[in-house]
Amino acid sequence: MPDPPSPPAARDHPLRSYLSYLAGEDVPGTGWVYTLTSRSLLEDVFASVSLKRELERDPHSTAAGHPYVVGRVAVASARDNARALEAAAEAAPAWAAVPLERRMELGAAFRRQLLRHRDEFLRLLTAEAHPLRLARWELSCLLAVYAEESLDWYRRQMHTEFRHGGRRLIVRRVPDGVVCLNPPQNAPAPSAALAVLALMAGNAVVVRAPRSIALSTMYVMRELVAPLLEDMGAPPGALGVVCGNPGSTLDLWVDSPLVDDIFYIGGCEEGLRLERRCVAKGKKPVLELAGNDTITVWKDADLDLAARAACEAFYGSGQICMAPNRVLAHAAVADELTRRIAREAARIRPGHPEDEGVLLSPVRRSERFFALLDQARGAGATLVCGGHRTELDGTRSDTGVFLEPTVLRVDGLADARRIDAVQQETFFPLLPVVSVGPGDDGPLLDEMLAFVDAGAHGLRNSLWTRSDEVVDTFLRRVRNGGLLKVNDSHIGFLPYLPSHGGTGLTGGVFGEANYPMLKTSHLQGVSVSAGADPRRAAFGDLWGG
């Protein structure tokens, strides 16, 4: 291990240190997990591993002063995980009783917090290997989710009133109770920030910060969200944040009678298994799992713009669930579109995440990437560009930690159905372009849209065309997915529209567009009368009977 700098002042920022947050208090844990800046993985991976081992063995080591060390998070004990649920269950009724309009103030206040702490939020994301441009994109998601327009829409969905027959009728959503949120390792902090929506619905929330990358999640929940709840007078326990083992924590949540909903963001296999366990225990599973999104490009599309949208597949090295994973192109434009995608892909480069313009992230395990590539070529696909590991400067290398943006050409849907890189989420910078046709345009469009709609996953799907008729057909036919985009960024966020959610393997049997404020609440109808005669009311005075 390299010697740490002798004076701690060699660090250009303080070491962040977070304890478990339980019942409004910071509670020591059983040990620490450390976050090292992503530069350590790019500059000296062996030093990175040695530093972590040294610090986990001896928290008082002078290694804590090394510039690579960004912060640490306490590991919660099994008892502390249980205490978080107990505190949440105690707080839930009091927090649910707070008027909706008051709870809605939390969303706007959180948005102001994000803007006020924008630089630190971005710094922590880049320290965790998010390229700066993508960190800004993740922030844009939260700013759209908590935009004034979105908040107004949520409020209207949560409570609507009518007058009928001398009665005051209300259709409202009421909180489910205790919601536990498990964010993913690839984007833990922005995902954990969705907990604010569950809080706005009136739930008490417990968040598990992933052990392997806990710091940014603890920062958002402890420094941005918790103070807002304290200022609002929320009961202690309305928010709990723990860092613990995923398996034992999820087991506790599933088995505990105190938990009502489990909001799980992660892989399909684990998520669908959790869904079955939740239903068996009478809990609501809210799932955000993998995506295998399609961009459909019709023959009259703006090919330059379509190619740029397709290349969003390579952002973050494809390790983004809502990035496009495959392109269906009308045969009349497939060749030219593929050329333009390859040209755009060549401009996407590796680098340090804090550097402007960098969009690729390190890929630590790439064996499956090459297996997918080999399987696709064996099934008839052609390699257009990419297909190699690279070093930080873009030089090809068998030991590089980056993967080149890789484009495959596939001719026809028959071959596409046999290629794993088309049919499965890859989570790599690997994009198959499937040429469809020739044939009559009507049946061809039907065939392409049927392929999109039959996808096993259902997160986002998008279309590029200048034809209003094709747009109308797309919107009428494609029911798969939580979000459809037309002539627009596939990954861009907008107010009102959902940022997450989908059908099929993406959202499980209850999958749909995910508005967490609505997903963690349930509908209730209310009738308030000044004093109706029950017999007349039951037998028809309302309808002239």
Image (spheres, rainbow, N blue to C red):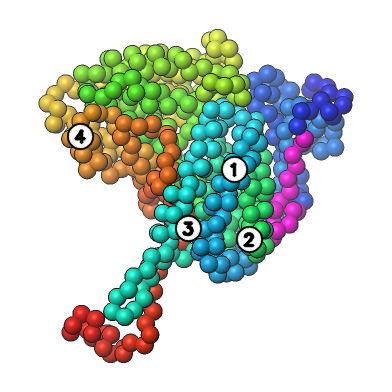
Q: Quadrant of residue 411?
A: top left
Query: What x and y, as percent, mark residue 431?
Result: 39, 23
Q: Earlier in the sequence, mark 4 or mark 1?
A: 1
Q: Which mark is residue 247?
A: none
Q: Amino acid at mark 1?
A: Leu
Gap in angstroms between the C-alphas marked 2 and 3: 21 Å
Magenta residue span: 14-27
What secondary structure is the magenta-colored segment mainly?
Answer: strand
Gap in angstroms between the C-alphas marked 1 and 2: 18 Å
Q: Residue furthest top?
A: 395
Q: Quadrant of residue 535?
A: bottom left
Q: Amino acid at mark 4?
A: Asp
Residue to which mark 2 is pinned: 232
Gap in angstroms between the C-alphas marked 4 and 1: 39 Å
Q: Earlier in the sequence, mark 4 or mark 2?
A: 2
Residue to which mark 3 is pinned: 520
